[in-house]
Amino acid sequence: MASAPRPSRQTARQLTADHEGFLRHRNFRWLKRAGALCLITILAYALIDVSPRPNGGTWLGYSLGTIGLMLIVWLSLLGLRKRTITRGAWSLKAWTSAHVYLGLALIVIATLHTGFEFGWNVHTLAYALMLLVIASGLFGVVVYAVLPAALSNNREQMTQPQMVEALSAVDRQLQSAAQPLDPHWAGLVLAALGEGAFSGGLWSRLAGGKHGGATQQAIAAFNLASTEEAADPALVRVEALLQRRAAQLARMRRHMRLKALLEVWLYVHVPATFALIAALTAHVISVFYYW
């Protein structure tokens, strides 16, 4: 039997790159480049003699400021870059890797640009907004590195529509099982059926939804009744279905909470980026106006 052809070295490298995370892209290529850039700027700041002292108003300060400005403008283009799918040296994965590591390098470059001089002015405001953007970006990196696996484990190979359908199936069984019950017990079931997994906004999703809601209250009441010696089998069956409903609700709420955590950092990162660009524009205009 003829053996299958072995993939070429280039194809093997491409397969490895396709399964690499953006942080490890090309054997940490952009981490090394960002580290080299930081080292060069630190050496320049330490070794180049400027008078009266290194700060944003010297030629070294202007040079570092120009580099920082160019980096910020380029880093802010990632949102536009996501709309174009390409492969190779400037694939989205490569761009994202560069975005992360050059964004971290910006802390060193911008700090040296200031000459460690801060005050209550637009220059320090731009610096503070830059740190806020970077901090929110780091949070995004962490959640994207950790939460997708947690999402997958929580779903247990179910998609979100499948989870919704599973809850609907339990609800239909509950409606049928509650038909012969007296109004008191049927009312508890109806109240539980009115409790959804998707109610509430972003902060409710982040909190994991309501705890101790109508479903849990119904479970407590049915559990008390089903533990009696002459327990009605219908009550026992409904309690078991309510337990299944509570478990499905909890899974869906964990799913929504994890998804919200994947999104919430953008509510800070994107507006802070626009604020940074505005403050940076004011910073540059004021520098050239008083130059």
Image (cartoon, rainbow, N blue to C red):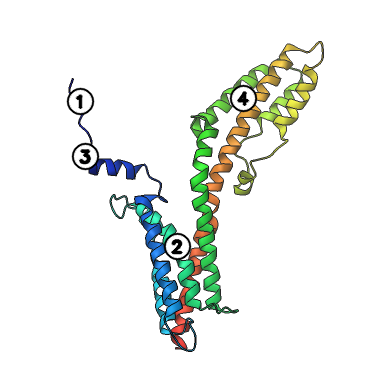
Residue at mark 1: 3
Q: Is residue 69 left or right of residue 248?
A: left
The residue at which mark 2 appears reads as 103
- Judge left or right: residue 163 versus residue 245: left
Residue type of the residue flagged with mark 3: Ser
Which of the two discs, 3 and 4, labels the residue nearer the N terminus?
A: 3
Q: Earlier in the sequence, mark 4 or mark 1?
A: 1
Q: CA distance from mark 1 to mark 3?
A: 15 Å
Q: Which residue is mark 3?
A: 8
Look at the image and tell me whether residue 121 can be seen: yes
Amino acid at the residue labelled 1: Ser
Name the residue at 55% across, 51% down.
264
What secondary structure is marked by label 1? loop
Determine crowd level at label 1: few under 14, some 14-19, many 20+ residues with C-alpha closer than 10 A: few
Of tags 4 and 1, the one toward the viewer is 1
Q: Residue at x 53, y 58 (%)?
A: 136
* Sequence-earlier tag: 4 or 2: 2
164 lies above or below 98:
above
Q: Is residue 132 left or right of residue 11?
A: right
Name the residue carrying label 4.
Answer: 171
Q: Position of residue 197 (x, y in %)?
A: 61, 36
Mark 2 or mark 3, which is nearer to you?
3
| Mark 3 nearby-residue class (10 Å; few <14, some 14–19, many ≥20) | few
Where's residue 255, x and y in %? 56, 38
